[in-house]
Amino acid sequence: EAQVTQNPRYLITVTGKKLTVTCSQNMNHEYMSWYRQDPGLGLRQIYYSMNVEVTDKGDVPEGYKVSRKEKRNFPLILESPSPNQTSLYFCASSAKYGQRETQYFGPGTRLLVL
Amino acid sequence: AQSVTQPDIHITVSEGASLELRCNYSYGATPYLFWYVQSPGQGLQLLLKYFSGDTLVQGIKGFEAEFKRSQSSFNLRKPSVHWSDAAEYFCAVGPNSGGYNKLIFGAGTRLAVHP
């Protein structure tokens, strides 16, 4: 079954305590992205990757890091979380555009930074 | 600037009624266009996409959308809404090459369905 998994699903942490949200896909997709979703703002892209070792900033990259050492994994790192990073985070993966291709989203990670 | 506008934040319809969700975009080049649905507590699921050709595209769950270049719009429609269609709907635009990694999303329209 095609799947994007994220862990953890829920996380409460404190300001400044480094955390990592993992993302893994089983479809051998080249493209992976991280988004944050906030009420009234829709989804905003944090970082994306077009293949192993190829990453680039999205619209809201400040305070986040990513790495793509393996094709299937694309972790999101918050080195020093702050309350304004409280949000719902989604990982997504896809192949290149095609009529039969689609983009798959993970179930989301709800983060609360105190 | 590239942007997507969904003018309606909330829409309520009765079950069995028709539905139209509006989407307008601003994009420098000819974009690819998408509609996603997010059910409560779930990730997003692609409903349909427009790349080129026929401007009326069919998607899953009985949805369709029409691309109108002159109006920079890509409105989503369904002739008869079911209670299970209650969800949040997002319109998105992206470049006409590559992959889904550079999409710009609208703020979403939350649909409520009355029995």
Image: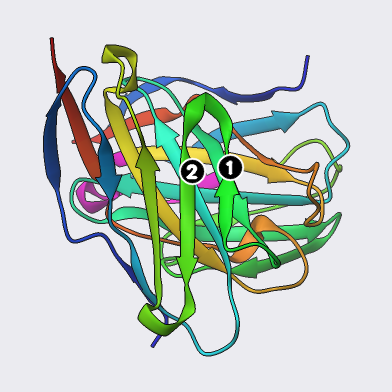
Residue B97 quadrant:
bottom right
Image point 57% across, 30% down: which residue? Answer: B60
SS category of the residue bearing label 1: strand
How far across and down, in percent of the image, does residue B49 sit?
60, 52
Q: Is residue A106 visible to the viewer in this orientation of the structure?
A: no
Q: Is residue B36 left or right of residue B107?
A: right
Q: Which residues are magenta?
A: A75-87
Asked if the magenta segment contains residue A66, the reply would be: no
* Residue that label 1 marks: B58
Q: Which quarter of the rendering shows the C terminus of chain B?
A: top left
Q: Which quarter of the rendering shows the N terminus of chain B?
A: bottom left
User: How far apart, in angstroms, are the residues tagged by discs 2 and 1?
Assistant: 4 Å
Numbered disc total: 2
Most foreground residue, A84 or B56 = B56
Residue A14 quadrant:
top left
* Residues at circles 2 and 1 in contact by the CB criterion of under 8 Å: yes
Image point 31% across, 21% down: which residue? Answer: B40
Image point 38% across, 48% down: which residue? Answer: B76
Most foreground residue, B72 or A28 = B72
Asked if the magenta segment contains residue A83, the reply would be: yes
Disc assigned to residue B64? 2
Q: Please name the amino acid that badge 1 sits on.
A: Gln
How far across and down, in percent of the image, does residue B103 sit?
54, 62
Q: Is residue A32 left or right of residue B56?
A: right
Q: Is residue A86 left or right of residue B42?
A: left
Q: Is residue B58 visible to the viewer in this orientation of the structure?
A: yes
The chain letter under disc 1 is: B
Q: Please name the amino acid that badge 2 sits on.
A: Glu
- First-in-chain label (2 vs 1): 1
How far across and down, in percent of the image, does residue B15 sit?
20, 17
